[in-house]
Image (cartoon, grey):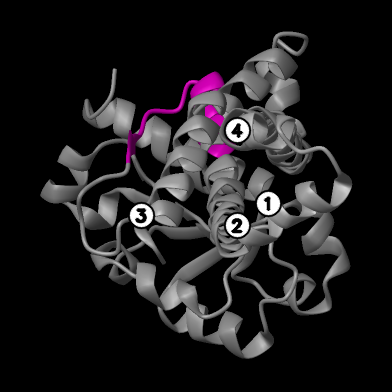
Amino acid sequence: MPKKEQATLEELNKVFSAQVPDGRTIAREVVDETLAAQPNAASIKKHFSEFVEKLQVEAYERYLRYEKDAWRVAFARVFGPKLRECSTPEKVLGIIGDHFYTLDKFFLSRTQSRRSRAGTAFEVVLGELFKKLGYRFDPQPEIDGNPDFVFPSINLYKRNAQDAIVFTAKRTLRERWRQIVTEGAKGLGFFLATIDEKVSEAQIREMKGERIHLVVPSRLKESVPQYASAANVITFEDFLEDHLDPKMKKWKKQGDIS
């Protein structure tokens, strides 16, 4: 790309980025606003699956609105002066055509960013819901596989990985679940949360062999045949009630958390 076009692309990205809040900030705003009207922890826990599905969609849609407004600002600031000099529609189209590759690269980068932000929204929504319910965890711990959360702490994990719970969120899986198997998967508590409806029976069997539980919204557990029949596919509510809550009691008794 010619230097002039590269400079134009950089300016577009700079102006655009300045208009859009960080994806984590957007997701936290959505969670806080929604749960402000739902202070009852028992209700949040009972309907955890519904909150996960609803909030990650709302966070993503809010980002899209920010994105649209940011594009208007960036386009007007970068191309506005030239367009105001145009006397005919043909000249306007000519300017746009001259910057075809700049615009192509810009929109390609936005598409890639959009996918990343959708995944971030899913992860942040889960983390914020866990916080609202008072669960203790360390986010983004530096261990093999780069999971999203370790309950109750990285310190306990390093002392005794089998007594901790390793929890990772992937909005969609494809084959990526193999990348996140950590030492914790060899122990008793590795959980992989997703809203992906297309995890195959073969993948689920492989996960079972690695002692991985797939955690999904209750709607998917009930409606997706391979999920309904698999013992290692559980709902978010099952994870809280059958796995995390008993561990919380144990960790408190052991003095690992206060």
118 up-or-down from 86: above or below: below
Question: Of the residues under marks 3 and 2, which one precedes in the sequence?
Answer: 2
Label 2 element class: loop
Quadrant containing the C terminus is top left
| Residue 147: numbered disc | 3
Question: Of the residues under marks 4 and 3, which one precedes in the sequence?
Answer: 4
161 up-or-down from 183: above or below: above
Which amino acid type corresponds to the residue marked 1 in the rendered image? Ile
Label 3 element class: loop
Which amino acid type corresponds to the residue marked 3 in the rendered image? Pro
- The mark lying in front, picked from 4 and 2, is 2
Question: Of the residues under marks 3 and 1, which one precedes in the sequence?
Answer: 1
What is the crowding at mark 4: few (fewer than 14 residues within 10 Å), some, or many (at least 20)? many
Question: Of the residues under marks 4 and 2, which one precedes in the sequence?
Answer: 4
> From this viewpoint, is residue 67 visible?
no
| Residue 95: numbered disc | 1
* Residue that badge 2 annotates: 99
Cα distance in 3D space between marks 4 and 2? 14 Å
Q: Nearer the viewer, residue 179 or 29?
A: 29
In the rendered structure, the answer to whether residue 211 lies left or right of residue 27 reads left
Which amino acid type corresponds to the residue marked 2 in the rendered image? His
The residue that appears at 63% across and 15% down in the rendered structure is: 32
Stretch in magenta: 125-139
